[in-house]
Amino acid sequence: MSIQKPSIPQGTRDFGPAVVARRNYIFGIIRRTFEKFGYAPLETPTLENLSVLTGKYGDEGDQLLFKVLNSGNFLKKQKGDKITEQVTAEDLEAGAKAVLPKIAEKGLRYDLTVPFARYVVMNRGTLTFPFKRYQIQPVWRADRPQRGRYREFYQCDADVVGTDSLLCEAEIVLMMCEVLNTLGLTDFTIKTNHRGVLRNIYQGLGSEARETDLFVAIDKLDKIGQDGVTKELLERGFSEQAAAQLFELLAVEGSFTEKLDKLRAAFGAASVPTDAADSYKGLQELGQVVDFLTAFGFEQFDHLEFDPTLARGLSYYTGCIFEIKINNVNMGSVSGGGRYDNLTGAFGLPGVSGVGFSFGVDRLYDCLDELNLFPESAATTTRCLVTNFDAETMPLLLPLLRELRAAGVPSEMYPESGKLGRQFKYADAKGIPYVLVQGPDERAAGQFKLKEMKTGEEKTLTLEQVLAALAA
RNA sequence: GUAGAUAUAGCUCAGCUGGUUAGAGCGUCGGAUUGUGAUUCCGAAGGUCGUGGGUUCGAGCCCCAUUAUUUACCCCA
């Protein structure tokens, strides 16, 4: 066999011990926050049947699905003596679209929301609604990797199904803030909008062109500017007049509620028909979310922004939508979500409303890394290295190792006796904060030498003192 | 799928107009130091210059192809 350079697939990564420790630090904060808000954990299979996945993410999404080839001889099926061709000459003639469903019936999970919807439908008889679940698992997309974009990455979802209450939306904002605050991120913006607002804007333009084309175009406003959006709208069949009208509507300024009021007036002026209860549902619901937050005692309204240009790609959102931008890092959104009135409808359970959001851990990691926000303690798990002075006395230190671990101090003994220099280097390279030494001198006195690596400070202590120092 | 950039030591990168034996920093290993890391000093190991072809007396450098990586677009966490 010839020697080959080892490699991993494009867009995937190995995570070394220090990286995993830091990722677990992020996972831990997110998990604890979700649980604090009453969400229960759920896990679903890596593989889903392709029939569950296809058609849920639009044409683009279907392209980005990783499909898994059927096992065995995927070209033929044998039942007893009877062999049937799975793929016929006509299929091959018809191209990939005809062949694919015959050779691949499973695919890798693309997000966590669709598997969740499938789970809810399959278990609707046993679930108590409203059902609140969180889910932290990797997802896969056959995308072209680039900055902040991977082919395998983790999502941390929290969703509620079975209630229309806007309390859920308000709590999403609370959870977003809690996680970001705990991680030490300070310069972030939670952008919020409502699909109803977007629909009203579309109605206000009075154009015949496609609604989704408008949403895609205005979502890019901060990226390509007013001229770029105008150009794109004209290409998609909107009139110049409609484009001008659009920017008039979007040009609302002020606080969250001031923007709501101004837009309400602008809609009225543009003769946009009101929804139920003689008001605009999107604006009204956003106002309700703010009211809930105020009643809760929420104090970070400076981080919450009503952005009428926010659209978000996934087509199933129908109500409030959210997105988090970390402002002092050049990175795509680290979190997003929203309400979808009919997600389970695709699986035969219509009329169940859900709302949820997701953190992208890999992007959060990149942000924290760039801003140097990881605490040092997140880098390593071992807290104390017990040096191995020589082969004869090493066994005498094993009870100490047991004591340390019993006291809940993550500890390890250097497995080989030999130069202390090597052992200290090991501790330094691994980022272990404390090193414990007991040589003949200390043993004679019944004591230990504890060195704090960061300061270089060394103390001679009794066992009780060592345990007290390390437990702190 | 579209467009660009890059590929030289384990890592980050130099390498002049194409000219002898391809360099540096970091890391690794050994020593100064058989009771102490990070800091200091000395030394060593480490290279199919991504791969294949071409031009040339001569290619890390120029040309073609190919593969991989990466950035941007589309879309998205």
Image: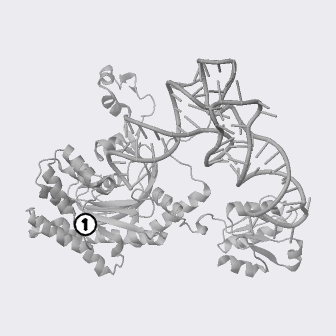
Q: Residue at x 37, y 22 (%)?
A: A82
For the point 15% across and 47% down, the residue is A209
Q: Is residue A349 visible?
A: yes
Quadrant where the N terminus of chain A sits is: top right
Most foreground residue, A89 or B51: B51
Question: Quarter holding the C terminus of chain A?
Answer: bottom right
Q: Locate residue A397, reporting x and y percent.
A: 80, 69
B50 vs B28, nearest the viewer: B50
Q: In the image, residue A13 lies at what x, y percent?
A: 53, 48
In the image, residue A189 lies at what x, y percent?
A: 37, 67
Image point 87% across, 79% down: which residue?
Answer: A445
Q: Residue at x 12, y 51 (%)?
A: A207
B41 sits left or right of A226 in the view: right
Left/right of residue A25 with respect to residue B49 in the rendered view: left
Q: Is residue A381 above or below residue B19?
A: below
Disc 1 residue type (three-letter): Thr
Q: Is residue A413 visible?
A: no
Displayed quadrant of residue A360: bottom left
The image quadrant that residue A462 belongs to is: bottom right
